Amino acid sequence: MKAGIIGAGAWGTALAQTLAAGGQHVRLWALEPEVVEAVNNDRQNPLYLPRIPLSPSIEATGDIAAMADRDMLLIVSPAQHLRKVVAQAPAGPPLILCSKGIEAGTGLLMSEVAAEAQPGSPIAVLSGPTFAHEVAKGLPTAITLACADADLAAKIAARIARPAFRPYLSDDVVGAEIGGAVKNVLAIACGVAEGAGLGLNARASLISRGFAEMTRFGLARGARAETLAGLSGLGDLVLTCSSTDSRNFSLGKGLGEGRAARDLLANRRTVAEGAFTAPVLREAARAARVEMPVVEAVCALLEDAAPLAQVMDALLARPLRAE
Ligand SMILES: NC(=O)C1=CN([C@@H]2O[C@H](COP(=O)(O)OP(=O)(O)OC[C@H]3O[C@@H](n4cnc5c(N)ncnc54)[C@H](O)[C@@H]3O)[C@@H](O)[C@H]2O)C=CC1
Ligand SMILES: O=C(CO)COP(=O)(O)O
């Protein structure tokens, strides 16, 4: 098995650790030379996945051309860097996209961006409720592997499945991507509820009504309802909306505590994808005439366009309607 992983943040490193279980060789491309050095010399990634001893079967590299002999590439960069990273990756092997977001400027999903950046490479999407630090520790995890080509999906699944890492197959690539992108924005909303002390009823309502928004938007973009109700949609939504282990939830918590988005986002090393996805999603939803009031509220808070009390009042004062 010759797996290559492009992107050595928390998730890329955790995936490398998972695939390396059992002594399989995994090559991991990192942007930062200090990450390459720490993985190869100290068996650690203190920058992005601290306190997890890494397998000796992981070989880090700073040279993306070293991925040329790999027969599958997992792309794990932040969504806004995916186009550039995929364009640099060697052409040919299937690309398994693990980033969650929508590209700013184009409104494209990651599979659409990858298809433009590297036409002809087979594409799959791996997405679900998967906190990196838990996966890296070998805790039980299930995840959606979506690919239009069922034979390729089955081959990839067999290669990445591990006793505690269980992929479920789907042919709904768009559905898997929309779930992962939208849930990050909704997690910010749930974090706001936590930070502002709005209570658990509010959080449950945001999860349910947020899921309604995800479903409306997903169906408008051609996703299937059962995909949105699966691991990559509802499953990831529930995970990310429930814990400060989520960077998106934590960002929202800071907003709910009254801190400014620009301060919370300044100089951060780790990525809170929802902050980038929110305005793109709002634009796409408006263009498709899909109502997404929770997403609109998150955008207003991120843009400091209105105080929290006013944003809450606007949400609660919407006309009463059928569920
Ligand atoms: N952390 C997690 O638990 C999970 C993350 N994901 C997704 O994986 C993707 C990557 O997230 P993480 O690994 O958590 O990142 P991270 O927040 O741990 O690390 C940031 C990453 O961004 C990279 N980066 C920074 N500037 C860059 C540039 N100019 N060009 C290319 N790369 C650059 C860094 O090298 C590093 O790999 C995101 O889309 C995220 O939503 C998906 C599932 C779980
Ligand atoms: O996508 C994730 C879990 O599935 C990680 O969530 P955060 O990016 O909010 O930390």
Image (cartoon, helix red, strand yellow):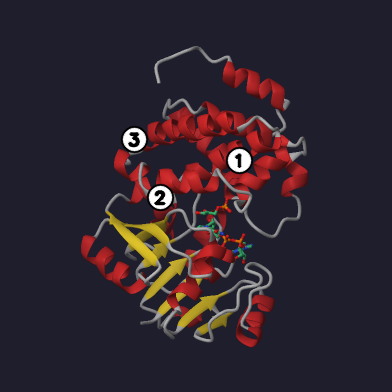
| 80 relative to 28, above or below | above
Q: Secondary structure beneath disc 2?
A: helix
User: Where is mark 2, residue-wise?
Assistant: 232
Labels 1 & 3 near each other (Cβ < 8 A): no
Which disc, if any, is residue 219?
Answer: 3
Q: Can you give x and y, in whole percent of width and height, for residue 11 in the image?
A: 53, 64
- The amino acid beneath tag 3 is Leu
Residue 323 position by quadrant: top left
Q: Is residue 233 left or right of residue 153?
A: right
- The amino acid beneath tag 2 is Ser
- The answer to whether residue 181 shows anywhere in this view is no
Q: Can you give x and y, in whole percent of width and height, for residue 213 in the image?
A: 45, 31
Is the CB of mark 3 within 8 Å of ligand 2?
no
Of labels 2 and 1, earlier in sequence is 1
Q: Secondary structure beneath disc 3?
A: helix
Density class for disc 3 (Cα within 10 Å; few <14, some 14-19, many ≥20) is: some
Of labels 1 and 3, earlier in sequence is 1
Mark 2 vs mark 3: give the one in front.
Answer: 2
Q: Is residue 171 left or right of residue 54?
A: left
Of labels 2 and 3, earlier in sequence is 3
Quarter that holds the N terminus: bottom left
The outermost residue toward the left is 151
Which disc, if any, is residue 188?
Answer: 1
Which residue is at 29% across, 71% downward?
158
Density class for disc 1 (Cα within 10 Å; few <14, some 14-19, many ≥20) is: many
Q: Is residue 85 left or right of residue 171?
A: right
Q: Secondary structure beneath disc 1?
A: helix
| 114 relative to 188, above or below | below
Which residue is at 59% across, 73% downward?
30
Q: Nearer the viewer, residue 156 or 290?
A: 156
